Image (cartoon, helix red, strand yellow):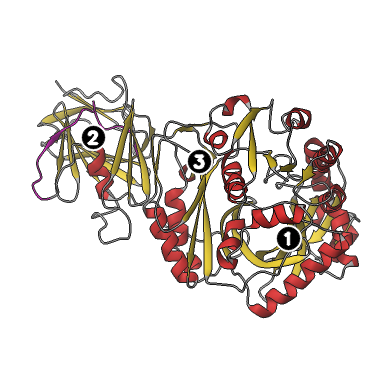
Amino acid sequence: VKTVLIANRGEVVVRVARTLRAMGLRSIGIFAPPDRGAPHTEAVDEAREVTSYLDIPSILAAAKGVDALHPGWGFLSQNPAFADACAAAGLIFVGPSAAAMRLMGDKAAARATAIQAGVPVAPGGDDLSPAAIEKLGLPVMLKAVAGGGGKGLRRIDDLRRIAEEVESARREAVAAFGDGRMFAEKLVAPARHVEIQLIGQVAFGERDCSLQRRFQKIIEEAPGVDAGLRAKMEEAAIRLAKAAGYANAGTVEFLLRPDGRFYFMEMNTRLQVEHPVTEAVRGVDLVRLQMEAAQGLPIAPPPPLKGHAIEARLYAEDPDAGFLPMSGRVLKLAWPAGARVEHALREGLDVTPDYDPMLAKLIAHGSDREDARKRLVAALRNTVLLGVQTNQSYLLRLLESKSFIDNDLAIGRLPDVPPEELPLAAWHAAAKPPISERNRRSVSLAWETLGRWRL
Amino acid sequence: VKLLWRGKSYEVRVDGLRVTVTPEGGAPRSGTAGSTTPVVVRDRGVIWVSFDGVPARFEIPTGGAARASADEIRSPMTGTLVAVNVKHGDIVRPGQVLAVVAAMKMEFRLEAPREATVSDVFLPAGSKVELGALLLRFKS
């Protein structure tokens, strides 16, 4: 392999291209028309235009002279038809086989595979009659077989509403995936989201991603469990990978109960957004390992765990307005020292509502959890991103919350954070020229009057 | 427009109208790990400030939405009228708090700009108000 096309955009491309360059490989990027000249097109050796990041024929047409294709995460990365099309075009797809993607993409088949492999799953099945649901015990989660991103997902708390909820979830699943098959699973709560990183059938430890809002991860960290539980979860994940004939990067997601029992949730057949926390504590480059695995090289077991790493995702959203995605132009940008920052931004760039609202992620590595937390807080305090509203202050409040500091986290239960407190110095700064607290001199403002002070 | 820092709050003077603004956050942070120099960017009608990892967006209103005349008290922002301290016929002294508007964890106390007699109170406490909404009128 000499030339690799990265079929993605934004920070994914910047991240993957960095490793390709370090490996002495030539990188080809793609861009859809709105992304012409975007930073990710400058991170690669050559960028080629496509109609969209989801148009398989257009992407394959851009792959002339390319040996391998890295799908990144999101977009077509979990689409078995894309993996098949790459193979048919003579390209090495940097990922698992299309068959393994199909098996894990079908949640009912993945569940059946887990059961056969002796991997624990929550009680459940495809019998959605009130009697069967009652037998499982409420609350129960209704899940779409073709599910993803929370679509076709329903929590059932009331037996009388089953028929209604099944119909509603089925409609949503048909609309989203063209597949209305549903199954039910007993809700596991309270639980943590703990996932095992695999490269092929070698485990690289876990990440705890319990801090989520509406199925969207916000803060992730590693390690998340003790050595004994890690060994059990890794063993279960490897059993599943073997049963699925799995190759390349994948993540097996589990729900972990406080008593240490865990249940298979799903497998993501790609590299994850939060892979850098694993890279930090294991001292590995997962993209390099993916490239090596794709070329049939053996994967060595990871180095021992070192320290603790925490990642925070900076989103273009307004936490004060229901976390609505925001857009705007990046006016000022400054990244901190002391943390790994993954992004594809620059001053003057327009953040549009066309794509994912994630702007950047910051990853801090420390000697232990508290050290990593402090480093991440310091990094966020030294981050400047103006022009687009972000969740920066919300991330800081989460990281400084008692629940986070005490590591008292569970899915669906976000820490209580205090309301935003705008430092007085920010008021001074807005009322420029800066006024000193001491001399109390009056300052004429260019403002017509006080407007809406958004805190 | 004049903005005066009064140690714990800002006093804003607009055409003789005085508004006291008290940030709930209290005194500026110091000694934290973050940068201590605010970064300020102005882009058309918006001032962006980043300080200590907390970004803030200040909108500069356009047009005469919140224009105050000496005989009228208008809402300085969109929010809730949490208190109305005067009624028709009251004689008010300069600096007397006439009404309080709250929004986004902030309270704005609307003070009398001069000695005057209240002729109209347009809205009761608890009302939702838009930026520039007419709240009170004095006898001219």
The residue tagged 1 is A199
Q: Secondary structure at mark 1?
A: strand
Q: CA distance from mark 1 to mark 2?
A: 74 Å
Q: Which mark is residue A316?
A: 3
Parent chain of label 1 = A
Q: Mark 3 Cα within 10 Å, few/some/many (few <14, many 20+)?
A: many
Q: Secondary structure at mark 3?
A: loop
Question: What subunit carries mark 3?
Answer: A
Q: Nearer the viewer, residue A157 or A8?
A: A8
Q: Chain of mark 2?
A: B
Count up the numbered dots: 3
Identify residue for label 2.
Answer: B87
Q: Nearer the viewer, residue A218 or A97?
A: A97
Where residue B55 sits: x, y (%)?
37, 44
Front of the two marks 1 and 2:
1
Dots 1 and 3 on the same chain: yes
**In the rendered image, which quarter is residue B71 located in?**
top left
Residue A180 at x, y percent in the picture: 86, 42
* Range shown magenta: A438-455
